[in-house]
Image (cartoon, grey):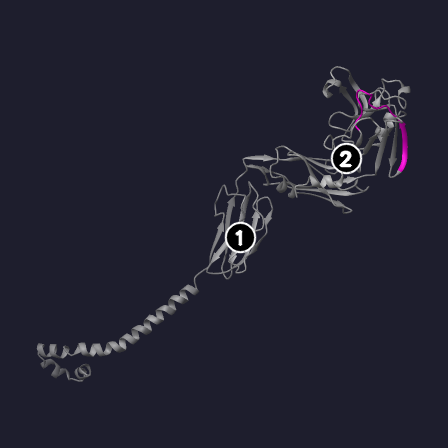
Amino acid sequence: MGVSHISNRSEKQSERWSRRGVLTVLGVVPAAVLTGCSGSAGAAESSSSGGSSATASVKAAKAPTVTVLPADGTKKADFTTPVTVGVTDGTLAAVKVTGNDGSTLAGTFNDAKTKWTSAKNPYSGTKYTVAAQAQGAAAKTVTFTTKSPGETFVGYFTPEANSTSGVGMPVSINFTHAVKDRSTVQKAITVTAEPAVEVVGHWFSDTRLDFRPETYWAAGTKITLSLRLKDIEGQDGIYGVQSKDVTFDIGREQISTVDLSSKEMTVKRDGTTLATYPVSGGNAQHTTWSGIMVISERFKQTRMESSTVGLGDEYDISDVPHAQRLTTSGTFVHGNYWASTSVFGSENTSHGCVGLHDAKGANNTSVAGYKFYDSSMLGDVVIVKNSGEKTVAADNGLNGWNLSWADWKAGSAV
């Protein structure tokens, strides 16, 4: 070929070439170049192929990218959706979400381990740190703070934490705002007992939820109330704030039965008769509620005024001794020092309460009023029969025992 021929010329001969000759020789070069292009094309293809492999290698070696939602630095993140962590060009190895309140958010990976989702939503008003690590890469740390709810509600519960109550004491919760989503709120509250027994909630209204078993608690039962209301939406835009566990105990069993036909009260402790007292109940114009009632408040002395229960100015006694509330509407079992001792056991003369003989000042330990009060506690059961009055409403006090188990369960939202 021409190029090879030229390369073999001597330097002297080459000097004698004319410019035209050089051009003539060079005119052959395109053919050589074209001939060479075939080989060059092959080389180019090889080079191109090598470039594709290199690109693939670059892609294969591309570092994983981890994305966290809410994003890093968010100040008012939503607390009604879960935290998510995703990765591209890799798989997730570990994720840990920790709140500044010490809480942690557990979660799960998808099958490909390219996404992690928290099992629960983050709490409101909390700063979170997310440490997320992709396989073979350094951990990524993200922080965000959730916003606080605009309006909140709480549930005030009875009995008090760490208290001991009688076998009739239900767990009663009164909410500061009406609850629209009863099911969600009830699912956020559990009541458990040791020894175990089925405990069911019953809604008396949009603001009251009580829990009880089918029959009275067993003496010695330990009860735990678990409130998980924080960030639970009771109604549009109103969220709960409580997340706590409280416990209380059930003491001995004391059940007192008031028979207003015989005008006598029999007190039984753990199935054995402890005492029998003569009593006076409501008169014909002011009959005493019948049914199962639970002691909900206790006062060594208290004022009783007829105007507070719709009876005008019929009475106003500033120092009623040993008063124990049975209904919200004003029924008490209490001591009575102003009536003749002959009344008790023989006449029903009260305005609806159950009275026992007592002494002014509430310090005489020998009288029935003192003795019954001294033997009682919150949550004790008082059953009234033969009063001439209908059964007390289940929500008039802590008196849900007047509902059958079927009717009680029908009031549950779950």
Q: On the picture, is 82 further left or further right than 378? A: left
Return the residue nearer the eye: 319 or 402.
402
Q: Nearer the viewer, residue 303 or 258?
A: 258
Name the image quarter holding the C terminus. Answer: top right
On screen, 62 above or below 397? below
* Mark 1 residue element: strand
- Quadrant of the image occupied by residue 303: top right
Q: Which mark is residue 66?
A: none
Element on which disc 2 rests:
helix
Residue with the most extreme top position: 313
Instruction: State the count of labels.
Output: 2
Give the side of residue 403 with respect to residue 366, left or right.
Answer: left
Q: Residue 152 in the image: state x and y as whole percent.
A: 58, 35
User: Residue visible at 54% across and 52% down?
Assistant: 117
Give the extent of the magenta segment. Answer: 272-289
Instruction: Provide residue 212's location: percent of width, then percent of height.
Output: 74, 40
Disc 1 residue type (three-letter): Ala
Residue 323 seen anywhere in this rendered image of the structure: no
Q: Which residue is mark 2?
A: 402
What secondary structure predominates along the stretch shown in magenta? loop
Which residue lies at the image location 41% right of the left edge and 67% below the top edge? Answer: 57
Question: Is 116 in front, or is 339?
Answer: 339
Q: Of tags 2 and 1, which is closer to the observer?
A: 2
Camera sees residue 406: yes
Q: Which residue is mark 1?
A: 131
User: Which of the two labelled residues, at mark 2 and mark 1, occupies the earlier sequence position?
Assistant: 1
Q: In the rendered image, which quarter is residue 258 located in?
A: top right
Can residue 286 be found in the magenta stretch? yes
Distance between the Cα atoms at labels 2 and 1? 55 Å
137 relative position to 157: left or right: left
Which amino acid type corresponds to the residue marked 2 in the rendered image? Asn
Q: Quadrant of the N terminus?
A: bottom left
